[in-house]
Amino acid sequence: MANLQLSLKKQWFEMTKSGVKTEDYREINEYWTKRLFRDVDKDELQDLIKGLQEGRSIEWAGLFHLHFLKEFEVNIMTLGYPKSTDTERILKLEHKGIEIGYGKPEWGAEPNKLYFVIKHGAIL
């Protein structure tokens, strides 16, 4: 299994490190779909993105998601893009899955917008 590395701004990194923020949000677009899903051909990719952007149900997206989602073991959260030796700016968390849903505005999500919601577990 692979690790999922995500770069964060200071506010979100600190909230995640303190245990307050337990999930991260990524846009539903071609870039993130390619990073989070496997074996998706271009037509399937476009159908997923278009369907979600046009308001297809989360349940519909979930069927797609279960079949094609990559398996990750650890979420590696970084404050910006640190050197590998800068351990103060690198946080390793249990990967608790990825859902498609609405994010919390207090954690940086736009209201009423669907995201890939990346769930975090305990600090490793």
Image (cartoon, rainbow, N blue to C red):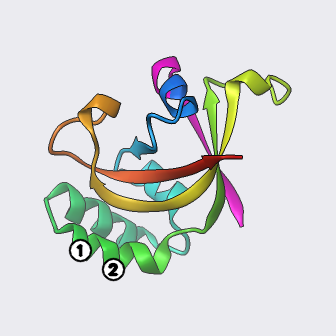
Q: Nearer the viewer, residue 94 or 29?
A: 94
Q: CA gap, disc 1 to disc 2?
A: 7 Å
Image coordinates for residue 38, horizontal then vertical, percent: 55, 70
Contact flag, marks 1 and 2 (Cβ < 8 Å):
yes
Rendering coords of residue 88 (x, y %): 73, 22
Q: Which mark is residue 63?
A: 2
Quadrant in the picture for residue 54: bottom left
Which segment did they paint magenta? 1-12
Residue type pointed to by label 1? Glu
Crowdedness near tag 1: few (<14), some (14–19) or many (≥20) residues, C-alpha within 10 Å: few
* 30 versus 26 height, above or below: below
Q: Determine whether, in the image, residue 120 is placed left or right of residue 85.
A: left
Residue at figure coordinates x 38%, y 61% from the top left:
99
Residue pointed to by mark 1: 59
Q: Does 7 lie within the magenta span?
A: yes
> Image point 28% across, 29% down: which residue?
106
Of helix, strand and loop, which one carries label 1?
Answer: helix
> Residue 59 or 52: which is nearer the viewer?
59
CA neighbours of label 2 inside 10 A, class few (<14), some (14 to 19), many (20+): few
Q: Residue furthest right?
A: 85
Residue 95 is one of the magenta-drawn residues? no
| Residue 86 left/right relative to 114 | right
Residue 24 occupies quadrant: top left
Q: Residue at x 20, y 45 (%)?
A: 113
Side of 80 relative to 119 (left or right): right
Q: Quadrant of residue 81?
A: top right
Looking at the rendered structure, the number of numbered marks drawn on it comes to 2
The answer to whether 16 is drawn above or below residue 70 in the figure is above
